[in-house]
Amino acid sequence: MGSAADTPTPVSDWERQLKGQIRRRYSTLKFPPDGAGRAIEAGYPAELIAKTPEWLAASYLGCGFLLGDLRLAGDEIVIDLGCGTGLDSYLLAMELTNAGIVLAIDMTPKILSQVQRISVGNIIPLAGDMERLPLTDELADMVIANASLNLTLDKGKALAEACRILKPGGRLLARDLVKVDELPPEVLSDPLSYNTSLGGALAEEDLVVEIAKAGFKDIAIMDHQPFSYVQSVKIEAVAD
Ligand SMILES: C[S@@+](CC[C@H](N)C(=O)[O-])C[C@H]1O[C@@H](n2cnc3c(N)ncnc32)[C@H](O)[C@@H]1O
């Protein structure tokens, strides 16, 4: 399989505009009040949030707790795609030894700059687009994505990139949104529905097809939770 750098795909005006809107949204976002409380409500254990810097817990933007009772050996290379301000990157970094690294990737420079405030663990912030990752093949042991896959314009491409950068047998762990019913007309006709995460939601069976097409096996979709007009689910898969 070639690296992304070998096969650059041109960025269309539509993609540039939409991603510009998404960047603007995440650059100007006012975090809703009681972010730490929202994270706990979304399933983050209160004792973990208590050990997290307050500003970081307060800037949680995910769609649920992804890490569960995940245990790491400590020396893994983990990639957090669409990391936001880095709450999950931070929690992962706390599990790693000095031999492990979290690469925290986001395409919005302003939000990514917050990751530099995290002063513990081996976390490296990296500007990048999930659909065109600036990373070499078979680099990572694990890729996570919390509420970010849904914002990609071509989920197949983003999933193929996640698979490409994983070592064979590496794990994908994501939380994302799936459509249960057709979205209401006011959402469908809203040109901003993409950047509010709803416009890009796939039905669960279509999401599974995209994950398999991207090169993953052992795909599991679980832990369905209501989320606005859609459902938030946990996704696990293994790079073939
Ligand atoms: C809803 S926020 C989730 C942030 C974080 N994962 C969390 O749980 O708090 C989505 C993030 O994905 C980023 N994002 C959206 N599309 C992206 C893409 N194509 N490539 C990289 N990052 C992207 C946004 O800039 C934003 O920071």
Image (cartoon, rainbow, N blue to C red):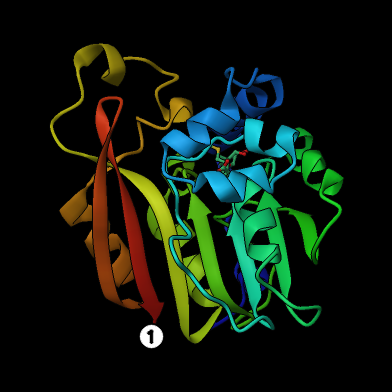
Say which residue appears at 57% left-offset and 55% top-offset: 130
Residue 6's spot in the image, x, y percent? 65, 74
Say which residue appears at 60% left-offset and 53% top-offset: 88
Q: Is residue 81 above or below residue 11?
A: below
Which residue is disc 1 drawn over? 240
Seen as rendered, the residue at the extreme bottom is 168
Q: Nearer the viewer, residue 98 or 83?
A: 98
Disc 1 marks a residue whose amino acid type is Asp
Residue 144's spot in the image, x, y percent? 52, 61
Q: Tell me the quarter of the picture where residue 232 sits.
A: top left
Q: Secondary structure at mark 1?
A: loop
Q: Nearer the viewer, residue 32 or 237?
A: 32
Q: Can you tell me whether the CB of the residue at mark 1 lies under 8 Å from the nearest atom of ligand 1?
A: no
Image quadrant containing the C terminus: bottom left
- Residue 8, visible in the rendered structure: no
Residue 43's spot in the image, x, y percent? 42, 44
Relative to 157, 87 lies left or right: right
- Residue 103, visible in the rendered structure: yes
Q: Tell me the quarter of the picture where residue 4 sits.
A: bottom right
Say which residue appears at 54% left-offset and 73% top-offset: 142
